């Protein structure tokens, strides 16, 4: 996976000549209700809900052709607590969040209508999931694949996006009782931000 990510970032750098139009955006998001699916040996699955959360992020796009931007970005998703403490009965104050770094594409579907622009968003990269609880030895961060897909609109440099994203991760501590169990975090976010053009 690391080789794939390196190749994607290299491709972005190579396809961003000096004459490309650049866009930089910053945004804040509201994550409606994250869920975490835990997959145990034997494909036993349990799904848990988290409280709503918030995110901040930024993207840098290069438009080498008018209707397709490619670039890089990142987002930080604030930790939110598992609902009703349903992660495990023996743990209180159980929270999770993530930091994501990705390559991104922005195909423009329409321009100069009721809004200035309607576009799609695609993201692929690496996420670092942060997990914490009141149990001192059960706090950790794990890397894994991240991807996101969504739809956005732009009006007077204000952007609004609806984004579905997924983080994959495993707990790889040799001493952990759940070593090798896999986890999938799914989120739906509404992002609002501002775009700067260069």
Image (spheres, helix red, strand yellow):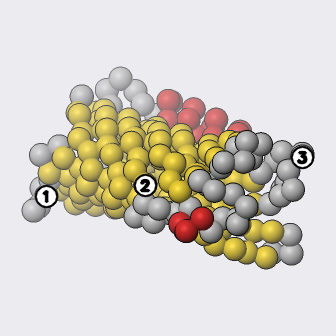
Q: Is residue 6 left or right of residue 84?
A: right
Q: Position of residue 192 (x, y in %)?
A: 27, 50
Q: Are marks 2 and 1 in contact (CB under 8 Å)?
A: no
Rounded to the nearest angstrom, the CA distance separating label 3 from label 1 is 54 Å
- Disc 1 designates what residue? 115
Specify which label sits upstream in the sequence, 2 or 3. Answer: 2
Q: SS at mark 1? A: loop
Q: Quadrant of the N terminus?
A: top right
Specify which label sits upstream in the sequence, 3 or 1. Answer: 1
Rounded to the nearest angstrom, the CA distance separating label 2 from label 1 is 28 Å
Q: Is residue 62 left or right of residue 95?
A: left
Identify which residue, 182 or 58, lies in the foreground. Answer: 182
State which mark lies toward you, 2 or 1.
Answer: 2
Q: Are marks 2 and 3 in contact (CB under 8 Å)?
A: no
Q: Is residue 48 left or right of residue 174?
A: left
Q: Quadrant of residue 40?
A: bottom right
- Disc 2 designates what residue? 53
Confirm whether residue 87 shows in the render. yes
- Disc 3 designates what residue? 175
Q: Is residue 164 left or right of residue 118?
A: right
């Amino acid at each position: 996976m690391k080789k794939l990510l390196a190749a994607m970032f290299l491709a972005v750098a190579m396809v961003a000549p000096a004459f490309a139009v650049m866009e930089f955006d910053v945004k804040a998001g509201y994550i409606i209700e994250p869920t975490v699916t835990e997959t145990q040996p034997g494909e036993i699955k349990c799904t848990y809900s988290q409280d709503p959360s918030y995110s901040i992020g930024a993207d840098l796009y290069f438009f080498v052709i008018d209707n397709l931007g490619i670039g890089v970005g990142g987002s930080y998703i604030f930790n939110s607590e598992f609902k009703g403490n349903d992660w495990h009965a023996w743990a209180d104050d159980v929270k999770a969040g993530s930091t994501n770094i990705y390559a991104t594409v922005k195909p423009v579907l329409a321009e100069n209508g009721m809004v200035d622009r309607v576009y799609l968003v695609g993201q692929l990269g690496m996420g670092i999931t942060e997990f914490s609880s009141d149990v001192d030895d059960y706090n950790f961060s794990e890397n894994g694949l991240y991807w996101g897909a969504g739809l956005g609109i732009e009006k007077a440099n204000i952007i609004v996006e609806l984004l579905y994203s997924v983080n994959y991760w495993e707990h790889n501590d040799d001493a952990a009782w759940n070593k090798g169990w896999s986890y999938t975090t799914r989120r739906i976010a509404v992002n609002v931000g501002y775009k700067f053009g260069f």
